[in-house]
Image: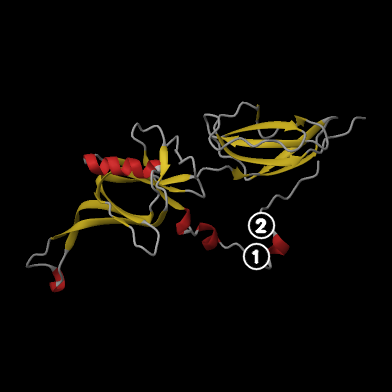
């Protein structure tokens, strides 16, 4: 059977359009969202209108200099750590995220927050914080804006180093990532072999569906009920129809999807 080269970036042997490792790892600030959970903790809300975001992390400095310190240089160790987050943007009147923030500020309640990478759909930081500053500005010649300062209660958990499952995303920012799907003739009549790039992680699952174009994509996080697939076995399908491969997490919630036109082996 013919092998396919599914290298994602193979533009004329990378003579141009060369995606360096540094470029691939760079993160655009616009993709990073500050989110809070609603009052009953059932939904993660991206704070509406946000523009600026600063995550502050610092530690107290404790001097341990003594008379016998070498060379007359002061010596210090790190003391207690603290964190805070500054956020600002366009104020969205009556948006649920600002309603939650206003209630928390009024009542002096802490909020559970999460900083997420909206493009890669993964959490970056999470923690409990209190609102210490929440001014609103309404200039006559510009839009109404807000500023927000949240000061941490306890640790700011690094979710990249300590991933959680499920890794909840705000619904308005969540969208399926794209899979590259290729269909070629299978080994028996009416069968297609399917190749997917990138390959799923070991804990995720594949599902598929076939039919006439256009196939409807699931929503991000939707529980998938289509036929499961091991990623290797040939699939019965009709040439000219579409096949959609859906990658889900371990619980069957949709994360990625892609579509190809079916090429099946003709009957003998």
Tell me the SS state at disc 1.
Answer: loop
Quick check: 163 left or right of 203? Answer: left
Name the colour scheme: secondary structure
Q: Name the image quarter holding the N terminus.
A: top right
Q: Is residue 108 left or right of residue 63?
A: right
Question: Element type at marker 2?
Answer: loop
| 2 and 1 marks in contact (CB < 8 Å) | yes
Residue 169: x and y in percent read 46, 41
Tell me the residue that label 2 is attached to.
Answer: 9
Question: Which residue lies at the image location 42% right of the left edge and 48% below the top edge?
Answer: 48
- Labels 2 and 1: the sequence-earlier one: 2
- Please say whether residue 113 is visible from this viewpoint: no
Residue 256 in the image: state x and y as whole percent.
59, 40
Q: Residue at x 49, y 43 (%)?
A: 172
Residue to which mark 1 is pinned: 17
Residue furthest right in the image:
268
């Amino acid at each position: 059977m013919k092998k396919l080269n599914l290298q994602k970036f193979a533009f004329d042997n990378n003579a141009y359009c060369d995606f360096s490792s540094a470029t691939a790892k760079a993160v655009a600030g616009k993709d990073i969202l500050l989110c809070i959970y609603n009052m009953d903790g059932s939904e993660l809300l991206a704070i509406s209108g946000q523009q600026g975001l600063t995550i502050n992390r610092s530690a107290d400095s404790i001097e341990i200099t003594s008379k016998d310190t070498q060379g007359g240089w002061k010596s210090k160790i790190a003391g207690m750590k603290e964190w805070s987050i500054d956020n600002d943007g366009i104020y969205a009147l009556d948006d649920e995220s600002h309603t939650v923030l206003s209630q928390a500020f009024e009542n002096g309640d802490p909020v559970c927050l999460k900083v997420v990478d909206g493009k890669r759909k993964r959490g970056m930081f999470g923690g409990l914080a209190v609102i210490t500053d929440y001014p609103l500005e309404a200039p006559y010649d510009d839009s109404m804006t807000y500023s927000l300062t949240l000061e941490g209660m306890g640790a700011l958990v690094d979710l990249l180093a300590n991933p959680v499952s499920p890794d909840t995303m705000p619904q308005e920012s969540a969208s399926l990532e794209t899979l590259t799907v290729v269909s070629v003739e299978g080994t028996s009549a009416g069968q297609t072999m399917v190749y997917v790039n990138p390959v799923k992680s070991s804990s995720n699952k594949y599902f598929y569906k076939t039919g006439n174009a256009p196939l409807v994509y699931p929503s991000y996080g939707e529980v998938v009920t289509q036929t499961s697939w091991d990623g290797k076995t040939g699939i019965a399908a009709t040439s000219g129809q579409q096949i959609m491969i859906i990658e889900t997490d371990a619980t069957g919630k949709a994360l990625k999807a892609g579509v190809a036109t079916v090429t099946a082996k003709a009957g003998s």
